[in-house]
Image (tube, rainbow, N blue to C red):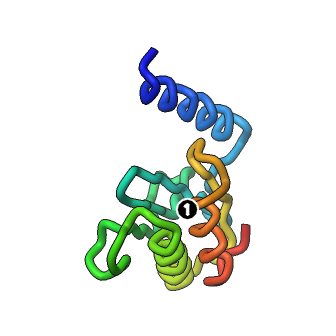
Amino acid sequence: MDKQIHKTVRRTRRRKRIRGAGVMGTTQRPRLSIYKSLNHMYAQVVDDLNGKTLAAASTAEKGLAAGKTGNALAAAAVGAKIAERAASKGVTAVVFDRGGFRFHGRVKALADAARKGGLKF
């Protein structure tokens, strides 16, 4: 099996295991879902019961990440921005969905910045 395909299959298995364990967003405590690609970092706050995205932020937006977009500094900028946008919608507590990615590096930087911005998880 190709290395990249194997990597994707393993992440998909981890993601299904995480979501199957009951990580689900409600109206009181929505889900902070993240996705990281090679070049960008994406985050959104989702209410799964109503099927609505309450807030979103990514390094693909203009002016959010100055310079490189695929590093921990850019991920921290996304975390701070998603916390700010969620707070403006009245969201203070979330359930963290790391999307099958390991909790280190860019994922950890985004989570720490979101916590520093006022989100509780």
Q: Is residue 39 visible?
A: yes
Q: Residue at x 69, y 71 (%)?
A: 93
Q: Whole-percent x and y of residue 105? A: 60, 60
Tell me if 83 is positioned left or right of 92 in this view: left
Q: Whole-percent x and y of residue 21? A: 73, 38
Q: How many marks?
A: 1
In the orientation shown, which residue stands out farthest toward the left? 62
Relative depth, front residue between 35 and 38: 38
Q: Is residue 82 visible?
A: no
Three-letter residue code for mark 1 = Arg
The kind of secondary structure element at disc 1 is helix
Q: Residue at x 65, y 57 (%)?
A: 104
Residue 70 position (above or below residue 114): above
Residue holding disc 1: 106
Q: Quadrant of residue 59?
A: bottom left
Relative depth, front residue between 73 and 27: 73
Relative depth, front residue between 86 and 27: 86
Q: Whole-percent x and y of residue 51? A: 47, 52
Q: Whole-percent x and y of residue 8? A: 48, 31
Q: Residue at x 54, y 56 (%)?
A: 33
Please state, as top left, top right, bottom left or bottom right, where the C terminus lies in the image.
Answer: bottom right
Residue 1 position (above or below residue 73): above
Q: Residues within 10 Å of mark 1 (few under 14, many from 20)?
A: many
Q: Quadrant of residue 47?
A: bottom right
Residue 91 position (above or below residue 12): below
In the orientation shown, which residue stands out farthest toward the top? 1
Q: Residue at x 51, y 56 (%)?
A: 34
Tell me if 65 is positioned left or right of 72 in this view: left
Tell me if 65 is positioned left or right of 20 in this view: left
